[in-house]
Each structure stands twice: as structure tokens, then as C-alpha cells.
Amino acid sequence: MRVYNPGRLRAGGEALEGSGRPTKRTHLRVRLHHVAQRRPDGLYRIHRLIRLHLGTVPHDSTRARIRTSAAGMTSLRRHGRAGARLVHAVASVRGLALIATILTVASGCDKAKSFVRAGQAARPPKVDPSKVLDLASRPTILFQVFGERSDPRLIPVGAMKDGHLTNIELTRDGWHQLDAMYLRRDARYTVYKDGEAHGAVTVTRGMWDNADTPLYTLPGCQTLTPLAQVKLDTDLPTQFTVEFLAASAPMGRQAERLQLPPELVRKLAHELGGIAGKRVGITPALLDSLDLHAVAIGTGTSAAPTVVASFIDPAAANPTSTTERTAHVLVIAEREPDGTYRPAFTHVVHGPLANAEFRRYVDHLDIDGDGVDEIFLEGWRFRGDTFLIALRYEGDTWREVFRSRSNWCLDERGD
């Protein structure tokens, strides 16, 4: 088993290294497999997956120079140079098997309705007037920055409303207005990692800078979540792909960086995973067969770090059938006054792969100014869409208080 702290997260905990199964590859396979089955905007999501699961990527001089089919590159053309460079980079790391997966996603862009609810009519988004975001008040927008280090993207995740993060509700014209206000050229936003500010991004192209040529399109979709092309300026070392949170107003807090020894984080992860897994029949032997990610982060809940541990089934990467059973545990724990750690949030899967929902740790950031960070997770369903989750510490428990949309197409669909 390899235990590690993915470099892309740059969390407060120490990196945990071991020997054994390649965890990064396992997680990448699982995620790419389900991404390839879903909507065509998945190519942009793959940037984030590679950042999470591959870690370091060879420099340009060592990348394999592969030749893709004309059809494949035509499919990638809509995504620009980033898509093509992504193909070359992945080829050098994991070979043509991943290339085939990525081209499967990209080629879906040419199948106009096969991924966007085939045969259903598209209508403008149905929005409750009482829930429409008041752009005139210039609300604070939370963004996510992702993609290739030299060509990243910025996407709005949600808006702060009455001190809470909410999904953005707008009409089609409203989304264009948001793009003009927040994603205009030269707009600059602070980026955050591990709860602290670490530079900024500057918009180089908004979604509809050119009304005739939006930054991206989805087949059969009329109302799109706007995306911006940005330039990243950060004081953190970066790898081939990046992922940050960003905001249109200051967030975060000044806090001492809290750490735990790697051996202790590993020990706690196994103890906490065992407690959570036992409730659904995950035995110690089964838990030990899973790949582990573990970090200790300073969230402000106490003077001690919060521990996040995630176990995922390596066999889920290449299942022979969706009726196969899988196991997955994510646990977040807080330290008690007596020094022991107790689970404060758990997500456990032990059953058919077809019904499985997975979680991964993304980052932490105080977005509401209460002095305690929110924890952000990414969730996904096997062969389904991904979504961002925000957890808030309430009492002695981490509770889900926000879940983003899982589809970039905002159209209403019907017969």
C-alpha cells in the first residue's frame, strides 16, 4: 500500500510515502473511467484528475510525441491547445490506454445529442424569481481554478448570500451578465490553497468575449456555465496541472500551520478508517487492501489539526462488471480533550460498484469569516457526474452545507 499526500493539495500535513501499489494511478483510472462515460465537457475535468492522481509529469523535453488520428484531433480542436498538450503529457506518463480514454471523452463532443439527453428539447433554465442572484449588489463569487499550469481555467462555483454559499441561479441573460461582470478581461482574483492566499489569477479571456465564438460549447446546449481563461501568478511550486479556490472578495484567515508526524497520521487514518468501515462490514483485511490518502490540516476547529483519511478500492479501476462490490471510506476526525481522535464526518461505501458514490478531499478555506474553515470535497458517482461539496463544522460534526451543480449545461430538458 502506498500512503501519500497528493502534491496538488498542498495541505498542512506531511506527505506520507510508502511502498506498494501505485495509488495515484489507481485513483486516476477510477476517475477517468467514469468521466469517459459522461458529458462532453469532461475534458476540462480531466485536467483536475491528472493533477490529483499523477503528481509530477515530465517536462516538455521528455514527453512522448504521439500521433493521434485526424478525427481525434478534430474533436480536441474545440478545447484548444490545452487539450492537445494534455494528450501529449498524459501519453508520457501512463501510455496509450489513457490517451484512448481521453479521446473517448473528446470524441463525444462531436456526437451532438448522445451525451446531452438525446431527443429531449432544450429550454432556457427555469429559475424561481425569488432565488435569482442579485448581480446589482455585486455578490462575492467563489471560483475554482483548474487545468494546465500554463493555460488554466476559472469557473464560478457559487455565490455568498446572507453568509452562506449557494448555487448561482440566473436566467440565460443573467449568466451573460455575470460573465461580463466577473469574467471580463483583466479581472483579477486572489487564489487560495490550504486556507491561505497564495497569489492571484488574471482573466485573459471571458466566456463570451467573442459572441460568435464562446470559450467552449456543449452539443445541443444553449445555456452554459461560463468559463474563463486565466493567467496564474502564485508563490507555490506547481506541477503540470493546478487546482485552487479563488474568490472575488477576501476570504481565509491568518492561522498557525498545524502538522502531525507522518507516522501518527498514518496510524490515525487506519484506526479511524477501521471504526467507520466496521459499521458496514469492512474488515481490517479489506481496509488494508484499499489505497490510502491521508492529511492533517489546520481548520480552526481546535488547537489540533483535523485529520482527513480516504481509502479507495484499486479494483474499481477496471471492473469486469458493475455488479462487482467495492469499498470506499472517507473520514474526517477531530481531536478530543483527552488527545484521542474521533470521527466527525464519514462517507462509507460497501456494496455494488454501480451504486457507489466516491469522495475526495480538495481543500479547506474559511469562506464565511467565522474563524473556522469549510472543508471542500469532490463527489462523484460511478459513471456519473462530479460535484463540489462544502462541509461546515457545527457543534462537533462536519455537515454538508453546499453541493454544486453536476452539469455545466443549464438548460431545462423535457420531451
Image (cartoon, grey):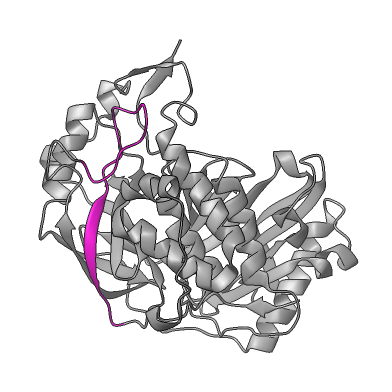
The residue depicted at 51 percent of the width and 53 percent of the height is 102
Foreground residue among 289 and 42: 42
Q: Is residue 278 left or right of residue 230?
A: right
Q: Residue furthest top?
A: 415
Secondary structure mostly seen in magenta is loop
Give yes or no for residue 338 being in the magenta stretch. Answer: no
The residue depicted at 12 percent of the width and 51 percent of the height is 184
The residue depicted at 29 percent of the width and 48 percent of the height is 160
x then y, percent, for residue 72: 44, 48
Give yes or no for residue 216 being in the magenta stretch. Answer: yes
Position of the N terminus, as image quadrant, is bottom right
x then y, percent, for residue 408: 38, 39
Task: Let me know if residue 134 appears in the view.
Answer: no
Q: Which region is colored magenta?
A: 214-235
x then y, percent, for residue 202: 17, 64
x then y, percent, for residue 183: 17, 51
Q: Is residue 304 above or below residue 148?
A: below
